[in-house]
Amino acid sequence: MTDKARDVDVLIIDDEPTVARALSRMLTLEGFNVETAQTAEEGLELISQKSCSMLICDQNMPEMMGTQLIQEAHDRGFNGKEILMTGMERTPEVEYAEKSGLEVFHKPWDTEQLKKRVRDVIGDPS
């Protein structure tokens, strides 16, 4: 297996275009290199092609749940950090994810807290 260049700071996977754009804009303005995908399949393809430091994905998507997508990403070699975004109230899957150590942000998210968390995990953009 060849090493992938660290092409992307943050990969955002969300089936809601407005959410993906808002997150992308917020992190791009902070200086991060951001890519977005609107489907789980598209996001997993990007993960197979590029290396990224952080994955931010929505929990409730048509193709698969975010928790499943994160597991599949790791199965495909993703070794960065992840944040699960959800607009839903507490569900058993989200509660289990939190107890397992997965970081969860609820929509609407706290912009400053999310930016700080990304900086804490992957550092300041260069």
Image: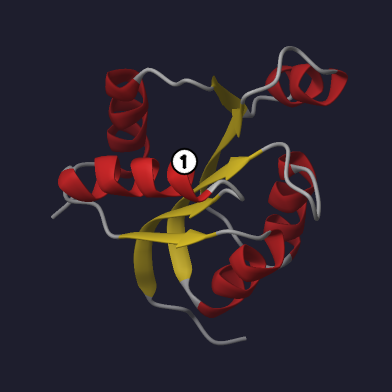
Q: Which residue is mark 1?
A: 19
- Which residue appears farthest toward the top when viewing the image? 90
Question: Between 9 and 110, which is closer to the camera in this rendering?
Answer: 110
- Quarter holding the N terminus is bottom right
Question: Between 27 and 73, which is closer to the camera in this rendering?
Answer: 27
**x, y (%) of residue 58?**
62, 40
Where 123 falls versus 125 (above or below)?
above
Mark 1 is surrounded, within 10 Å at the Cα level, by few (under 14), some (14 to 19) or many (20 or more) other residues, namely: some
- Identify which residue is drawn at 57% across, 68% down: 47
Question: Between 125 and 91, which is closer to the camera in this rendering?
Answer: 91
* Colour convention of the picture: secondary structure
- Which residue appears farthest toward the left when viewing the image? 126
Helix, strand or loop at label 1? It is helix
Where 6 falls versus 12 (above or below)?
below
The answer to which image quadrant residue 8 occupies is: bottom left
Please indicate whether residue 58 sits to the left or right of residue 21 in the image.
Answer: right
- Identify which residue is drawn at 77% across, 16% down: 95
Tell me the kind of residue under disc 1. Val
